[in-house]
Amino acid sequence: AKELVRRMQDGMTAQDALQMSNPIRKPKHFQDNSSKDDPLPIRLTQETLKGLKQDTDTLSRVRDLRKVDSAVTQGNARIKANNAKDRRNARRTIHKITDQEIAKDTAQLEQNKKWQLQEKARLAGYNITDLQSANPQPSLLS
């Protein structure tokens, strides 16, 4: 507890101080978005929901392929149920599917970031100096 307080006094956030004091380490390639100041808002569109459905279908395909790779005969756990060629093809297919899903997810993230920048620009309003006339004229109706 004293170590947590010391780290927080040094300017570390409570979440980061707690994670650093935890003896269980997270994986090297783990992407933690909780420490970012500006999280990406999630837009629920028809495309996003279709993507979720496709993700569940992909996960079920990968589950079935992993069963092909790890299936053993009943009564003897050392003898595989499928031959080596089928198991190798299942592993290759899993790698291909994983690579395709990573590419789709990164493209979706880029699209989300692009959308977020457009939204920030819209919410920031207009810059009057960017308009053609730098000196606005008063209205005749006022």
Image: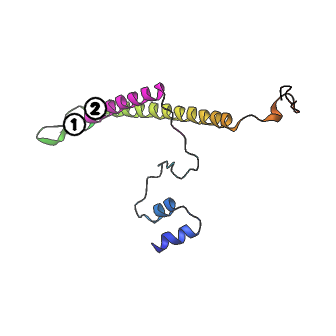
| Residue 88 picture location, percent across and down | 32, 33
Does the magenta segment cover residue 42? yes
Front residue of 82 and 37: 37
Question: Which circle marks residue 64 in the picture?
Answer: 2
Q: Residues within 10 Å of mark 2 (few under 14, many from 20)?
A: few
Q: Can you tell which quarter of the image residue 128 is in?
A: top right
User: Does residue 16 appear to the left or right of 139 in the view shown?
Assistant: left
Alpha carbon separation for disc pair 1 and 2 = 10 Å
User: Does residue 119 appear to the left or right of 126 in the view shown?
Assistant: left
Question: In this figure, which residue is indicated by the disc labeled 1?
Answer: 71
Question: Above or below — where is 58 with respect to 12?
Answer: above
Mark closest to the chain's N terminus, 1 or 2:
2
Does the magenta segment cover residue 129? no
Label 1 vs label 2, nearer the camera: 2
Of helix, strand and loop, which one carries label 2?
helix
* CB under 8 Å between discs 1 and 2: no
Of helix, strand and loop, which one carries label 1?
loop
- Taking the view exactly as shown, the residue that stands out farthest to the front is 142
- Taking the view exactly as shown, the residue that stands out farthest to the left is 75
Query: Which stretch is magenta?
Result: 40-68
Question: Which circle marks residue 95 in the picture?
Answer: none
Residue in view at x 49 percent, y 48 percent? 31
Q: Amino acid at mark 1?
A: Ala
Q: Amino acid at mark 2?
A: Asp
Q: Residues within 10 Å of mark 1 (few under 14, many from 20)?
A: some
Q: Can you tell which quarter of the image residue 86 is in?
A: top left
